[in-house]
Image (spheres, helix red, strand yellow):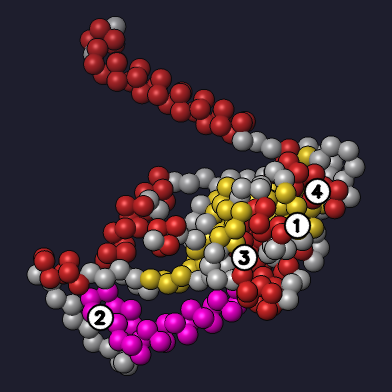
Protein backbone atom coordinates (compact mmCIF):
# COMPACT_ATOMS: atom_id res chain seq x y z
CA UNK A 1 0.00 0.00 0.00
CA UNK A 2 1.03 3.62 -0.60
CA UNK A 3 0.92 4.40 3.14
CA UNK A 4 3.38 1.59 3.88
CA UNK A 5 5.77 2.28 1.02
CA UNK A 6 5.87 6.04 1.58
CA UNK A 7 4.88 6.62 5.23
CA UNK A 8 6.36 10.11 5.47
CA UNK A 9 4.81 11.28 2.19
CA UNK A 10 1.49 9.73 3.21
CA UNK A 11 1.64 11.49 6.57
CA UNK A 12 2.40 14.83 4.91
CA UNK A 13 -0.47 14.44 2.45
CA UNK A 14 -2.83 13.35 5.20
CA UNK A 15 -1.76 16.20 7.49
CA UNK A 16 -2.08 18.76 4.65
CA UNK A 17 -5.59 17.50 3.87
CA UNK A 18 -6.61 17.87 7.51
CA UNK A 19 -5.19 21.41 7.65
CA UNK A 20 -6.93 22.38 4.41
CA UNK A 21 -10.27 21.03 5.60
CA UNK A 22 -9.82 22.82 8.90
CA UNK A 23 -9.11 26.14 7.21
CA UNK A 24 -12.14 25.75 4.92
CA UNK A 25 -14.41 24.88 7.84
CA UNK A 26 -13.08 27.81 9.87
CA UNK A 27 -13.68 30.16 6.95
CA UNK A 28 -17.25 28.90 6.62
CA UNK A 29 -17.87 29.33 10.36
CA UNK A 30 -16.44 32.86 10.33
CA UNK A 31 -18.50 33.73 7.26
CA UNK A 32 -21.69 32.50 8.91
CA UNK A 33 -20.92 34.15 12.24
CA UNK A 34 -20.23 37.51 10.60
CA UNK A 35 -23.20 37.38 8.27
CA UNK A 36 -25.88 39.92 8.90
CA UNK A 37 -29.45 40.50 7.93
CA UNK A 38 -28.27 41.54 4.46
CA UNK A 39 -30.51 38.98 2.78
CA UNK A 40 -33.51 39.58 4.99
CA UNK A 41 -36.46 41.46 3.62
CA UNK A 42 -37.79 44.65 5.12
CA UNK A 43 -36.40 47.98 6.23
CA UNK A 44 -33.08 48.02 8.04
CA UNK A 45 -30.47 50.27 9.61
CA UNK A 46 -27.03 50.13 8.03
CA UNK A 47 -24.05 50.09 10.38
CA UNK A 48 -20.69 51.53 9.32
CA UNK A 49 -17.78 50.98 11.70
CA UNK A 50 -14.76 53.24 12.05
CA UNK A 51 -12.17 51.62 14.31
CA UNK A 52 -8.47 52.17 14.89
CA UNK A 53 -6.41 55.01 13.49
CA UNK A 54 -8.04 56.59 10.45
CA UNK A 55 -5.31 56.29 7.83
CA UNK A 56 -7.62 55.73 4.86
CA UNK A 57 -11.20 56.52 3.90
CA UNK A 58 -11.98 54.23 0.96
CA UNK A 59 -13.74 51.51 2.96
CA UNK A 60 -16.01 53.91 4.84
CA UNK A 61 -16.80 55.97 1.74
CA UNK A 62 -17.81 52.83 -0.15
CA UNK A 63 -20.06 51.64 2.69
CA UNK A 64 -21.80 55.02 3.01
CA UNK A 65 -22.33 55.24 -0.74
CA UNK A 66 -23.81 51.74 -0.96
CA UNK A 67 -26.14 52.30 1.99
CA UNK A 68 -27.22 55.63 0.53
CA UNK A 69 -28.29 53.92 -2.69
CA UNK A 70 -29.95 50.92 -1.01
CA UNK A 71 -33.66 51.66 -0.63
CA UNK A 72 -34.08 49.03 2.10
CA UNK A 73 -31.66 50.97 4.32
CA UNK A 74 -33.75 53.63 6.01
CA UNK A 75 -31.08 55.08 8.30
CA UNK A 76 -27.41 54.62 9.18
CA UNK A 77 -25.46 54.27 12.41
CA UNK A 78 -21.82 55.29 12.36
CA UNK A 79 -20.10 53.25 15.08
CA UNK A 80 -16.95 55.18 16.00
CA UNK A 81 -14.10 53.83 18.12
CA UNK A 82 -11.01 55.73 17.01
CA UNK A 83 -8.51 58.30 18.33
CA UNK A 84 -8.65 59.98 14.92
CA UNK A 85 -6.00 59.99 12.21
CA UNK A 86 -5.05 61.79 9.03
CA UNK A 87 -6.67 65.08 8.11
CA UNK A 88 -7.44 63.94 4.56
CA UNK A 89 -9.32 60.74 5.47
CA UNK A 90 -11.32 62.53 8.18
CA UNK A 91 -12.37 65.32 5.82
CA UNK A 92 -13.28 62.89 3.05
CA UNK A 93 -15.49 60.89 5.41
CA UNK A 94 -17.05 64.06 6.82
CA UNK A 95 -17.99 65.22 3.31
CA UNK A 96 -19.50 61.84 2.41
CA UNK A 97 -21.51 61.88 5.63
CA UNK A 98 -22.92 65.30 4.79
CA UNK A 99 -23.89 64.11 1.30
CA UNK A 100 -25.53 61.00 2.73
CA UNK A 101 -27.37 62.96 5.43
CA UNK A 102 -29.22 64.83 2.69
CA UNK A 103 -31.01 61.57 1.84
CA UNK A 104 -30.95 59.46 5.01
CA UNK A 105 -30.62 60.03 8.72
CA UNK A 106 -27.24 59.18 10.24
CA UNK A 107 -26.57 58.72 13.94
CA UNK A 108 -23.10 58.46 15.50
CA UNK A 109 -22.51 55.94 18.28
CA UNK A 110 -19.30 56.75 20.16
CA UNK A 111 -17.51 53.76 21.71
CA UNK A 112 -14.49 53.84 24.04
CA UNK A 113 -12.69 56.60 22.18
CA UNK A 114 -14.03 58.99 19.55
CA UNK A 115 -11.54 61.81 19.77
CA UNK A 116 -10.10 64.38 17.38
CA UNK A 117 -10.76 63.00 13.87
CA UNK A 118 -13.19 60.53 15.44
CA UNK A 119 -15.27 63.39 16.78
CA UNK A 120 -14.74 65.36 13.55
CA UNK A 121 -16.60 62.78 11.46
CA UNK A 122 -19.28 62.34 14.15
CA UNK A 123 -20.02 66.07 13.99
CA UNK A 124 -21.26 65.62 10.44
CA UNK A 125 -24.09 63.26 11.43
CA UNK A 126 -27.66 64.10 12.46
CA UNK A 127 -27.14 63.07 16.06
CA UNK A 128 -24.45 61.83 18.44
CA UNK A 129 -24.89 59.36 21.28
CA UNK A 130 -22.03 58.49 23.64
CA UNK A 131 -21.36 56.51 26.77
CA UNK A 132 -20.92 58.64 29.90
CA UNK A 133 -17.25 57.62 29.99
CA UNK A 134 -16.46 57.83 26.29
CA UNK A 135 -13.23 59.73 25.59
CA UNK A 136 -14.12 62.37 23.03
CA UNK A 137 -13.37 65.95 22.05
CA UNK A 138 -9.66 66.64 21.48
CA UNK A 139 -10.60 69.19 18.84
CA UNK A 140 -7.23 70.15 17.48
CA UNK A 141 -4.38 69.37 15.11
CA UNK A 142 -1.04 67.77 15.84
CA UNK A 143 2.03 67.80 13.64
CA UNK A 144 5.36 66.15 14.22
CA UNK A 145 8.42 64.54 12.74
CA UNK A 146 11.24 62.34 14.00
CA UNK A 147 14.72 63.81 14.41
CA UNK A 148 17.31 61.25 13.24
CA UNK A 149 20.39 63.48 13.59
CA UNK A 150 21.92 61.67 16.57
CA UNK A 151 21.21 58.26 15.04
CA UNK A 152 22.90 59.28 11.80
CA UNK A 153 25.91 60.61 13.73
CA UNK A 154 26.33 57.32 15.59
CA UNK A 155 26.21 55.15 12.49
CA UNK A 156 28.25 57.54 10.35
CA UNK A 157 25.62 58.53 7.79
CA UNK A 158 25.49 61.95 6.17
CA UNK A 159 22.43 63.33 4.43
CA UNK A 160 22.87 65.12 1.11
CA UNK A 161 19.95 67.28 -0.07
CA UNK A 162 19.62 69.14 -3.37
CA UNK A 163 16.55 71.36 -3.44
CA UNK A 164 14.95 73.89 -5.75
CA UNK A 165 13.79 76.30 -3.05
CA UNK A 166 14.49 77.28 0.56
CA UNK A 167 11.57 75.44 2.15
CA UNK A 168 11.44 72.35 -0.07
CA UNK A 169 12.87 70.16 2.73
CA UNK A 170 10.97 71.80 5.56
CA UNK A 171 10.68 69.37 8.46
CA UNK A 172 13.82 67.47 7.46
CA UNK A 173 14.69 64.84 10.09
CA UNK A 174 18.43 65.34 9.64
CA UNK A 175 18.81 69.03 10.50
CA UNK A 176 17.51 71.60 12.96
CA UNK A 177 14.38 73.52 12.02
CA UNK A 178 14.73 77.28 11.60
CA UNK A 179 12.45 79.78 13.31
CA UNK A 180 10.99 80.78 9.93
CA UNK A 181 10.13 77.16 9.22
CA UNK A 182 8.51 76.73 12.62
CA UNK A 183 6.35 79.80 11.94
CA UNK A 184 5.31 78.45 8.53
CA UNK A 185 4.28 75.10 9.99
CA UNK A 186 2.50 76.77 12.91
CA UNK A 187 0.41 78.81 10.48
CA UNK A 188 -0.24 75.65 8.48
CA UNK A 189 -1.51 73.86 11.61
CA UNK A 190 -3.61 76.88 12.55
CA UNK A 191 -5.34 76.84 9.16
CA UNK A 192 -6.19 73.14 9.45
CA UNK A 193 -7.39 73.73 13.01
CA UNK A 194 -9.72 76.49 11.81
CA UNK A 195 -11.16 74.05 9.27
CA UNK A 196 -11.84 71.60 12.10
CA UNK A 197 -13.62 74.23 14.20
CA UNK A 198 -15.63 75.48 11.22
CA UNK A 199 -16.84 72.00 10.24
CA UNK A 200 -17.79 71.06 13.80
CA UNK A 201 -19.74 74.31 14.15
CA UNK A 202 -21.51 73.66 10.85
CA UNK A 203 -22.30 70.03 11.60
CA UNK A 204 -23.46 70.64 15.16
CA UNK A 205 -25.23 73.90 14.29
CA UNK A 206 -23.23 75.69 16.96
CA UNK A 207 -21.73 79.17 17.03
CA UNK A 208 -18.18 79.01 15.70
CA UNK A 209 -16.86 81.12 18.58
CA UNK A 210 -18.52 78.77 21.06
CA UNK A 211 -16.75 75.80 19.49
CA UNK A 212 -13.47 77.74 19.38
CA UNK A 213 -13.51 78.18 23.16
CA UNK A 214 -13.34 74.42 23.74
CA UNK A 215 -11.23 73.57 20.69
CA UNK A 216 -7.92 73.60 22.54
CA UNK A 217 -7.16 69.90 22.20
CA UNK A 218 -8.56 68.86 25.57
CA UNK A 219 -10.52 65.63 25.92
CA UNK A 220 -13.97 65.27 27.48
CA UNK A 221 -16.00 62.42 28.85
CA UNK A 222 -19.25 61.69 27.04
CA UNK A 223 -21.08 63.23 29.97
CA UNK A 224 -19.05 66.45 29.77
CA UNK A 225 -19.43 66.56 26.00
CA UNK A 226 -23.20 66.40 26.35
CA UNK A 227 -23.24 69.36 28.73
CA UNK A 228 -21.18 71.33 26.19
CA UNK A 229 -23.50 70.51 23.29
CA UNK A 230 -21.00 68.24 21.54
CA UNK A 231 -23.16 65.16 22.20
CA UNK A 232 -26.96 64.85 22.07
CA UNK A 233 -27.67 61.77 24.18
CA UNK A 234 -26.02 59.30 26.53
CA UNK A 235 -26.46 55.65 25.68
CA UNK A 236 -24.96 52.60 24.01
CA UNK A 237 -24.86 51.18 20.50
CA UNK A 238 -28.31 49.59 20.76
CA UNK A 239 -29.77 52.95 21.77
CA UNK A 240 -28.18 54.47 18.67
CA UNK A 241 -29.68 51.77 16.45
CA UNK A 242 -33.12 52.32 17.96
CA UNK A 243 -32.83 56.09 17.53
CA UNK A 244 -31.72 55.79 13.90
CA UNK A 245 -34.46 53.28 13.13
CA UNK A 246 -37.22 55.50 14.46
CA UNK A 247 -35.83 58.52 12.59
CA UNK A 248 -35.90 56.38 9.45
CA UNK A 249 -39.54 55.50 10.00
CA UNK A 250 -39.02 51.84 10.93
CA UNK A 251 -41.82 50.33 13.00
CA UNK A 252 -41.30 47.49 15.44
CA UNK A 253 -37.96 45.70 15.75
CA UNK A 254 -35.05 47.52 14.16
CA UNK A 255 -32.80 45.17 12.20
CA UNK A 256 -29.23 46.03 11.27
CA UNK A 257 -26.99 45.21 8.33
CA UNK A 258 -23.23 45.61 7.98
CA UNK A 259 -21.24 46.15 4.78
CA UNK A 260 -19.62 43.09 3.29
CA UNK A 261 -16.11 42.83 4.71
CA UNK A 262 -13.50 42.80 1.92
CA UNK A 263 -10.96 40.01 2.03
CA UNK A 264 -7.47 41.00 3.15
CA UNK A 265 -4.57 39.16 1.57
CA UNK A 266 -1.52 38.07 3.57
CA UNK A 267 0.58 40.50 1.53
CA UNK A 268 -1.67 43.45 2.38
CA UNK A 269 -1.67 42.41 6.05
CA UNK A 270 2.13 42.28 6.15
CA UNK A 271 2.58 45.56 4.26
CA UNK A 272 0.15 47.23 6.64
CA UNK A 273 1.84 45.97 9.80
CA UNK A 274 3.29 48.25 12.46
CA UNK A 275 6.81 46.98 11.75
CA UNK A 276 6.52 47.86 8.07
CA UNK A 277 5.13 51.29 8.91
CA UNK A 278 8.06 51.86 11.28
CA UNK A 279 10.56 50.94 8.55
CA UNK A 280 8.80 53.26 6.12
CA UNK A 281 9.03 56.10 8.65
CA UNK A 282 12.78 55.54 8.94
CA UNK A 283 13.46 55.11 5.22
CA UNK A 284 11.01 57.76 4.02
CA UNK A 285 10.55 60.23 6.91
CA UNK A 286 8.05 63.02 6.49
CA UNK A 287 6.20 65.70 8.39
CA UNK A 288 2.63 64.68 9.13
CA UNK A 289 -0.39 66.56 10.40
CA UNK A 290 -3.43 64.87 11.81
CA UNK A 291 -6.68 65.12 13.69
CA UNK A 292 -5.31 62.63 16.19
CA UNK A 293 -5.49 62.17 19.96
CA UNK A 294 -2.23 60.69 21.28
CA UNK A 295 -1.99 60.52 25.09
CA UNK A 296 1.80 60.17 24.92
CA UNK A 297 2.00 63.65 23.39
CA UNK A 298 0.36 65.16 26.43
CA UNK A 299 3.36 64.38 28.66
167 w.r.t. 153: above or below? below
Q: Secondary structure at mark 3?
A: helix
Which residue is labeled 4 in the image?
243
How many residues crowd mark 1 within 10 Å: few (<14), some (14–19), many (20+)? some
> Which-is-in-front pick, marks 4 and 1?
1
Tell me which label, 2 or 4, sits earlier in the chain.
Answer: 2
Instruction: Give the spatial CA distance, label 4 vs label 1.
Output: 11 Å
Residue beneath the point at 29% across and 82% down: 177
17 w.r.t. 193: above or below? above
Image quarter (top left, top right, bottom left or bottom right) of the C terminus: bottom left
Left or right position of 232 against 6: right
Residue beneath the point at 44% across and 57% down: 295
Tell me which label, 4 or 1, sits earlier in the chain.
Answer: 1
Which residue is labeled 1 in the image?
232
How many residues crowd mark 3 within 10 Å: few (<14), some (14–19), many (20+)? many
Q: Which mark is residue 120?
A: 3
Which residue is labeled 2 in the image?
176
Do the CB atoms of the residues marked 1 and 3 lie less than 8 Å apart?
no
Left or right position of 122 against 88: right
Where on the picture, by quarter, is residue 224? bottom right
Amino acid sequence: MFSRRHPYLFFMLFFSTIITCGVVCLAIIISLSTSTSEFEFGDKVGVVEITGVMDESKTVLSALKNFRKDESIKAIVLRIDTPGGGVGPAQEIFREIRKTAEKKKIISSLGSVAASGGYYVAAGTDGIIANPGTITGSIGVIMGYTDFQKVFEKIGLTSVVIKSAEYKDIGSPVRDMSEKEKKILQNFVKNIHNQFVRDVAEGRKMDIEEVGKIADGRIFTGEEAKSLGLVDRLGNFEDAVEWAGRLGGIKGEVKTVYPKVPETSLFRYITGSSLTELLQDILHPMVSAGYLYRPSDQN
